[in-house]
Image: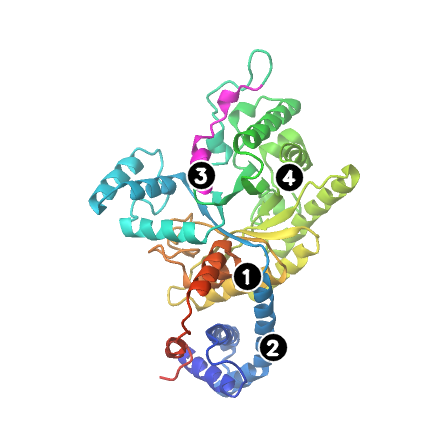
Amino acid sequence: MEEQIRKLILEVIEDLNYDPNDLELQKYLYEKGIKAFKKINSGNYSLDEIRNFIVSNVPKMMKEYSRMKYAITKKSFTKTNFGVSINYQLVELFKIFNSVSSVDEFDAMKNQFLKAQPTIFPGLLECTYEEVQNIYKNIIDNCDVITPEVEAKMTLTINDQMELFNSDGTINFQVFNFSYLDTIIAFAKQNNMKVRLHTLIWHKHFPKILDNCSKSQIITFLDTYFSSIANRYGADTFYTIDVINEIVADIHSEEFQQGRVLRDSKWKEKLGDDYYLTVLKLARKNFPNSHLAYNEYDETNKEKRKRMISIIHDIKQEERITGTILLDSIGLQSHYHEYTTDEEIKETYEDLSETGKRLQVSEMDVTKINQQDDVQVNRVFRTVLDCAATYNIDSFTCWGPTSSISWKSKKVRTFLNDNGEVNNSCKQIVDTYSQKKKNKNLNFQKSNLSEPNNDFHNKNSIFQKR
């Protein structure tokens, strides 16, 4: 049936005035047509009825595509950033790759290194020399920003085995362990990248050494912790700092069903219901010029989004009282799946943009449920790109460098495929947001005087007749 839909779409657009070499338009109309088919197919409509539906919706599709293309073209002239999350073990594999002279030597050193680790990140043990080579090249060629996945979380930066306080009541700096984060920061600086610091406060990581501390002691600890990071790495290293992460009640939790806004956590228990204000004030004190963010998931859930917005309104009220900007942006984690609808994504951007805070895509991936094709996955990526360009985001980060090296190993589409090459779903996003890619293309255009060969595009049209 999908082949019949493809032919229907071809017949409909044949009479339209469009550039036959515009593969993106063809792909866009195809994705929309398949979506329309899946949406109405359960009603057992005839092909003629489906044809009429497509014909009546093509003008809307064309208008939406034109608007999106204009927004993306306009965005290409502004300062944007593309990034990906990374872990210290992959960075160490990059070092090994760059130091060896053979595949066998790489395999031996890789296995030796990984087996010495307490845990191994998904996908790394199976990662081949060629895959590491491709991942390395595509990250340094395309990424302006990288995000440490765990290296800046307190589970790695705080040593719970140490005494928190010195005899004089000051914080014992030996409790801080930045060695893992150092690896990420060094890699970023070596490759002209900035860092999205993820994350200062997360409900899953409340150090045990704080269990018996008073509120004032915890605040002293956080103040010292934040200042230590700022002093160690400098003000210009961090593109954005995820100060608070996932603070709204999970949609499957009892507190959410009871209508509560905040997730139960030790931070809330120890610092009070407005702890996010306390944390943001400490962050602004120690990172006065940094871009501070609130990062959240399940943002497409309308009820959860209302609670996110209520927190942002509280923050804005505190900003008016203090005269200080405490929050610059909202990080939309964007962990979607192929059945996430266009409407859910668009409503999310529309609602959150009304807060007046800048929006950023902070952790995007799309879970693959149907193992047949990527049409719906591509649709989700394209809709997010549409919204991102329309609402003028300045940062777009994919979560996990490849589909295998990911928290949902092999079940997602993200920046790179399993071989370390840029995923087809993500190519236009990279082209739109990567400053490195834009600069590379600009340099290529200046040095390449030959005319483009359009025969290739004509051969590869997804609408060519068979």
Magenta residue check for 178? yes
Q: Residue at x 48, y 54 (%)?
A: 436
Query: Quarter holding the C terminus?
Result: bottom left
Q: Amino acid at mark 4?
A: Asn
Disc 1 or 3, which lies upstream in sequence? Answer: 3
Q: Amino acid at mark 1?
A: Val
Q: Residue at x 40, y 82 (%)?
A: 464
Q: CA distance from mark 2 to mark 4?
A: 43 Å
Which residue is labeled 2 in the image?
Answer: 60
Q: Amino acid at mark 2?
A: Lys
Q: Position of residue 154 (x, y in %)?
A: 51, 32
Q: Which residues are the magenta region?
A: 171-189
Q: Tell me the number on the disc at residue 384.
A: 1
In the rendered view, does 165 fall on the left or right side of 318?
left
Disc 2 or 4, which lies upstream in sequence? Answer: 2
Q: Position of residue 49 (x, y in %)?
A: 53, 85
Q: Secondary structure at mark 3?
A: helix
Work out whether residue 19 or residue 203 is closer to the camera in this orientation and state it: 19
Which residue is labeled 4 in the image?
Answer: 289
Which residue is labeled 3 in the image?
Answer: 184
- Pointer 1: residues within 10 angstroms few (<14), some, or many (20+)? many
Q: Tell me the number on the disc at residue 183.
A: none
Disc 1 or 4, which lies upstream in sequence? Answer: 4
- Pointer 4: residues within 10 angstroms few (<14), some, or many (20+)? few
Q: CA distance from mark 1 to mark 3?
A: 28 Å
Disc 1 versus disc 3: nearer the observer: 3
